[in-house]
Amino acid sequence: MAGNRHDPSGRAGVIRRLLPAVALLLALGTGALLLLPARIDWDRYRPALAEHAGDRLGRRIAINGALRLRFLPETVLEADGIEVGPSGDGVELTAAALRLRLDPWHLLLGRISVREVALVGADIRLPWPPSRLPTLRPLGSLTALDARLEQSRISVSGVSFDGVNARLLAGGLADALSMEGRFAWRGQPVAFSATLGRAGDDGVAPFDLSAQLGAARVSTRGVLLAEGGYEGRLEAGGPDLSAVLPTPPGAFSAQARLTATAELLAADQLQLVLAGQQARGGISLRYAPTLRLDASLLASSYELDAWEQAFRRGGTTALPVSIDLSAESATLRGVRLRQLRVGVQLEQGRIRVPDGRAELPGGMKLGISGAGTAEASEWRISLDGPRAEALSPVLPALGIALPGFALPEGPLRGTLRLALDANQATLSEMALTLDGQPVRGGASWRWGQRPFLGAGLELGRIDLANWMGTLPSLSAMDLELRLSVATARWGGRDFDNLSLDGSASGGRVVLRRLRARHAGAEITAAANVTLSPLRVQEATLELEGGQLAQLLGTAPGALPLGAAPVRLRASLSGPPEQLALRAEADVEDARAEAQLTLDANEPRAQGSLTLRHPGAARFLAPWLSPGMAEWINGGSFALIANLGLRGRALSAESIDMLAGQQRVRGALGLNLSGDRPRLTGQLSTEALRLPEDPGLGGLGALRALDAEITWRADRMELPPLPPVTEARGGLRLDGGRLALELAEGRVQSGALRGLLEIDPAEGLPRVNLTLNLDGLAVTEPLPATPPQILSGTADMALRLTARGTAWPAWRSSLQGEGQVSMRDGTVGGLDMAALAAGIARTETLEAQRAIQAALAGGSTTFQRLMLPFAVQAGQFSLRGATMGTEAGEARLAGGIDLPRGVGELRVTVPVPDAPEIGLWFNGRLGAMQRLAETARYMRWRIERER
């Protein structure tokens, strides 16, 4: 037996005999597994299967559809037509199918033992807001549980989690409940896992949750409270927070304290690092009354451009989101902001800002509120600041480019409405005050290859200089502008009730109407200008009313017809290098016409000017003294000039001026490039009659310009003096000092030279006169009554100085010196030859009669007459004057009191070895009385005869 037991060939035989039996058993078992499900009556198991599934899910289950069982590779029973009843927790649950994994051995013995429950295509709707935290079963009864969700969806207050595949495991009574799986969030897969520990005696159960969205992660660890709710810590991090929340892109990490109730999930004490920038605050997810995510973040500074883009993308979030941002400083589109406080709400594709506040550099406070979408929005903006120019960087930040435009410096306050879309920005409902002046109306800016600016504004007061810088940019944009301005300032002048209606399009600027009121005059203008190439098609200007002096900014008495109303009509057309200007003006009876060709590129101009008035004295009255007005009266005024302009130099190549009986021709040039205008040129006249009392009114005008002019006059009259012929000289004006030179002139046969200087710099004007007269032949009595010069040849030299502006002041302040020298002439008033003959008589009585007759009249021929004199305070006095005749020499003394108009002259004739004989003239000039002084001489003769 021992040998048989160890015989290998015997064991092999036994195996060979058992193999067929084993194969038969396997075939029978396999056949049974394949044929048995079809022969089992599963309808009698429906209640048991539904009860087992309901126990696992914690709610009533009804199976109304077909049942399918497969043994391999696992024993699985699939059921269709699933109805899930309520459990009282508010959770709505439906499923396309129910799949149960059964214990095959118990099934072969006719018993149902469920190892795993899976809901396929489930749609789970959680109540919102929840009255309590929903549960599957009391934790104490969840033992040996293995439940799954496949291709399901969970919905919470309109937010859906699709593609949910999860597994719920529960071990023994002491084991934790764990769940893990995946779902889709906004098209991105999310993996999660959670562990819920068994509750202790106090009802508090530990809970851990972690989730992964791409490279982003979030985890929390805490406890579920017995009274409901959750407390724990939250940690999160990832490469891009914007994939989860509407924030700027960038890596982030966050830590916070997390609490949850049936109404709220809150993360406070939040410490967030986003793209390297730290912030703190809190985030909460509210369940009631609607699902909403609120966040509040405080940082030292923000780059708001990234946040703006995030809000535009986040406007389509699945649930409402509210984010409050606060920072000490921020930048938005290059604009620096301070004290930023802004709240942003995102819901159903709309972006809403209930309230936002910030401050610009310069103290401009901004307030903003409004709503819109990523494509279009409308905002209410409030402004309050001491300097409106602080808004200058805001327009470029909005994409509004107005080169050269400058906001004024005054305070700006008020509100306006701003509408933005992809095509344009619109300002409306303006209720502003700029530098204390109202601003109303609206404006719009449309972006494009040719931007468009449309504006309709009502303004209180503006300075047009701030707008002039934008004119060069009109060629690159289209414009539609309507302005109404209470007061517009331009070039230091105020224009009232200004209204403007114009447009610019396709390189053409059209000023349909410009109306304004200035200095009492109504101004109307219109223009049509092509910008490329630049050409003025037509421009017109009309002005009517107002006073000429007010329009030119001078006193009414400083200009001819200064108080008269003005009517002006002007037109302009042509390219900039050849603009044709035609203008007509009427000022009372005066009429001016001008035709000019202008070159705006140089600048340069050439043309003619004609000015006429029927009364020269009336027209020139502000520039004439009463004596000059009387001198010029009786004729008209006319001025014809050919004008030229080059740069800042104005020239009149030909001037022909007629004023009464005076006519002047010549050429003048005015240079405006220096500190003061400088007038140069030459003037000539055939006959110039100077006024007897010119006066020096209006000397202040001498400081307005410098001048250097040469002049020539064929005949110059200054009554009662003899006329000057062939006169030429020059006029110089420098810093208010006037020098009028007579370089050459003829007075009858004599040559006259002189210089008149007027210096207004020292209080009362100082007048200096220098005259030199050579070879004047006196042919008429001078003066008309004795003592007088009847004939002779005279030379004269004098230097006089006076102060004042008219003859009375000059007479009383005149001082200086001079000398009159005459030769080969005759004086009237005494007869020196008869006097000598009388003295030679031996008979005393006859001598007396002859002497009295010689001193009573007659004339004396002299060979020389020397009259040196000095002047002090208007008093002329002779110094060492003598007269030499054939009958002897006479000495002359005396003077003239110009202020009083009186004079005296004493002629003394020496007699050898005897007392002198004298003749005394005194009294008013032109009516002097004579008195012969012969008493001493006659007494001497009588005494000698005794």
Image (cartoon, grey):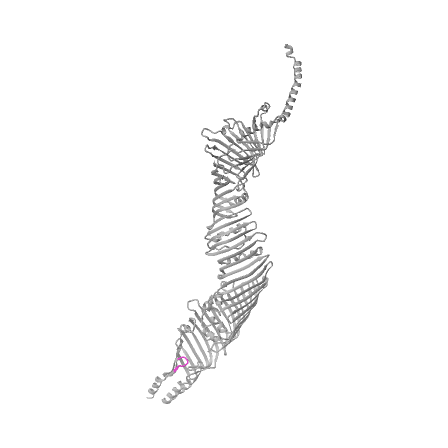
Q: Position of residue 843 (x, y in %)?
A: 37, 90
Q: Which of these two is toward me, 258 or 463?
A: 258
In front here: 715 or 341?
Answer: 341
Magenta highlight on residue 946: no
Q: How many marks?
A: 0
Whether residue 310 is visible to the viewer of this picture, yes or no, is no
Q: Is residue 51 visible?
A: yes
Residue 927 in magenta stretch = yes
Residue at the far top in the pictured view: 1
Depicted 840 relative to depicted 491: above or below:
below
| Residue extent of the magenta highlight | 924-929
Q: Image quadrant of residue 436? A: bottom left
Depth check: give the residue in front, 553 or 780.
Answer: 553
Query: Looking at the picture, does residue 271 appear above or below residue 825?
Result: above
Q: Measuring from the top left, give residue 229's x and y in whole percent.
A: 47, 34
Given residues 293 and 119, the one toward you in this image is 119
Q: Position of residue 311 (x, y in %)?
A: 53, 44
Q: Position of residue 67 (x, y in %)?
A: 60, 30
Image quadrant holding the N terminus, namely top right
Quarter of the figure with residue 185: top right
Q: Residue farthest to the front?
A: 44
* The C terminus lies in quadrant: bottom left
* Magenta part, dominant SS: loop
Residue 860 versus residue 461 in the image, above or below: below
